[in-house]
Image: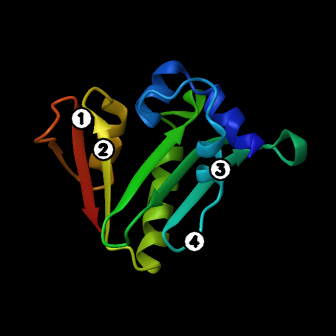
Amino acid sequence: MERDRRFIKSLSDSSRYNRMMGLSREPPAELLHQLTHVDYTHDMALVAVIGAGEAETIIAVARYGGNPDACEFAVAVADQWQRRGVGTALSLLLFDYAKLHGVRRMHAIIFARNYRMLKLAEYLHMTVRRSTYDDTVVEAWRTL
């Protein structure tokens, strides 16, 4: 759980805002618990790390959770590791895992100005459209 807390705290204000919809620098304990305790049925998280042992550091996380008919999908990549394919690789692995475990559809809510995530969603062959209820966000989804 401490590695996850350090990862969230290491994100720039912009990355944390885009990924966690405005989360403060210090994540609440209940959020950390939710992020670190997956049940492998309704939710799953894959992480990319560098280093080993005490020096092991999370550089990216991709996760899904919810109803297998339409799971919510999210990915976060440490700022210095963005635009290197880490988020793409983790997302594709997560989609494959989800499909093997009965998930039929992934969806995400993305800030309309989060151009990097929108580009990733298109690369992942997700359908992307402006939200009908909030023009500051975009809805993305993909059938697996």
Q: Are marks 3 and 4 in contact (CB under 8 Å)?
A: no
Residue 26 screen position, x and y as percent: 64, 27
Residue 85 visible in image: no
Front residue of 4/67: it is 67
Query: Which circle's residue, 4 or 1, is located before the other in the chain?
Result: 4
Name the residue beneath numbered marker 3.
33
Amino acid type, mark 1: Val
Q: Up-down: is 36 above or below 96?
A: above
Give the label on residue 137, or none: 1
Query: Which circle's residue, 3 or 2, is located before the other in the chain?
Result: 3
Question: Within 10 angstroms of label 1, few (less than 14), some, or many (20 or more) residues?
Answer: some
Q: Nearer the viewer, mark 3 or mark 4?
A: 3
Residue 130 screen position, x and y as percent: 14, 39
Residue located 60% across and 23% down the image? 25
Question: Within 10 angstroms of label 4, few (less than 14), some, or many (20 or more) residues?
Answer: few
Disc 3 and disc 4: Cα gap in Å? 15 Å
Q: Is residue 134 left or right of residue 111?
A: left
Residue furthest right as drawn: 54
Q: Nearer the viewer, mark 3 or mark 2?
A: 3
